Amino acid sequence: MAEIKRYDNRLGIWGWLGGGRWGVERYAYILHRITGLGILFYFLLHIVVTSLRAKGIYLWAGTGFLHQPIFELGEYLVFAAFAYHAFNGIRLVLVELGFAVGKPIEPVYPYKTSLNVQRPLLVCMMILTAVFLAIGGYAALIE
Amino acid sequence: MNGTRYWTWHMTAGVVLLFLLGLHMLIMHMVGTAHWFAPYGTEPDSLQNSLFRDGKLFFTVTYILLLGVALYHGLYGLRTILFELTLKPATEKTITAVLLIVGVGLFGLGTWAAVAAHGIALAGARG
């Protein structure tokens, strides 16, 4: 197998968290990763907790340990992270497949940036996220 | 290349999760739909409603499917983020092995629990 040429990660943590001049979409992507890591952390615990039901232990139901307001709040945060991650994920898949990024044009001066062409897609997805956050929040409040 | 293929699977898993986890969220968290599979009282996560869903084969199968797809999507995503640090090949191999063991282990645990809970719910319904 051919050896892969490797470069030092000179940007360090900024390489993960910095958007530079790439616009708000890049920061949406960074938040996508942060919410993804949060959901993954919750999910790994969720598997263990829900697997306990096979032994008759239901920590989330009735008088169970997890049936407390602080965990209800945490549950809503997981829901919020999921809603954001899902809608931004749809945007990322569409962009990766070449949708909503405009057609390639000749690089004729004065150059036009293609970075803002996908902005309406981001706005649509964030509106949908906000709607779901509101509905989920209402459900958490009346519970 | 394997990397491209795994990335395509990662995206595909994300689309599948949209439906499976979306359904899970509709059932557990959304006003107006949280009663779909919760015939006992108003709380979809009560003991009775949990047992009700565990007794349905549809939920046992989709729980296992959701478990596998979500583990792949999540752990491969974590691996991608970690690999951006330009690690040594040996470190990358170790990370891949650890994530694989964690993933397979948790998939085994969750699958066993889903199947066992299905049996418990059916036995309770009969008994």
Image: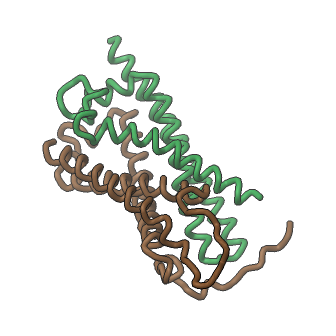
Chain colours: A brown, B green
- For the question of whether residue A64 can be seen, the reply is yes
Q: In the displayed image of the protein, which residue is found farthest to the left?
A: A142
Residue ID at (49%, 82%): A21
Q: In the displayed image of the protein, which residue is found farthest to the bottom?
A: A10
Comparing A31 with A77, the one in front is: A31
Comparing A3 with B125, the one in front is: A3
Residue A28: quarter of image:
bottom left
Q: In the displayed image of the protein, which residue is found farthest to the right?
A: A1
Which quarter of the rendering shows the C terminus of chain B? top left
Residue ID at (69%, 76%): B88
Residue B31: quarter of image:
top left
- For the question of whether residue A78 can be seen, the reply is no
Q: In the displayed image of the protein, which residue is found farthest to the front?
A: A109
A31 to A13, vertically: above or below: above
Left or right for B49, reference A42:
left
Comparing A126 with B74, the one in front is: A126
Q: Residue A60: percent from the left, percent from the top?
A: 26, 42
Q: Residue B61: percent from the left, percent from the top?
A: 50, 29
B119 to A69, vertically: above or below: above
Which quarter of the rendering shows the N terminus of chain B? bottom right
A20 to A42, vertically: above or below: below
Residue ID at (53%, 36%): B65
Q: Residue A110: percent from the left, percent from the top?
A: 58, 84
Residue A130: quarter of image:
bottom left
Residue ID at (71%, 71%): B90
Comparing B28 with A127, the one in front is: A127
Left or right for B122, reference B91:
left
Q: Residue B58: percent from the left, percent from the top?
A: 45, 25
* Number of numbered tags placed on the structure image: 0
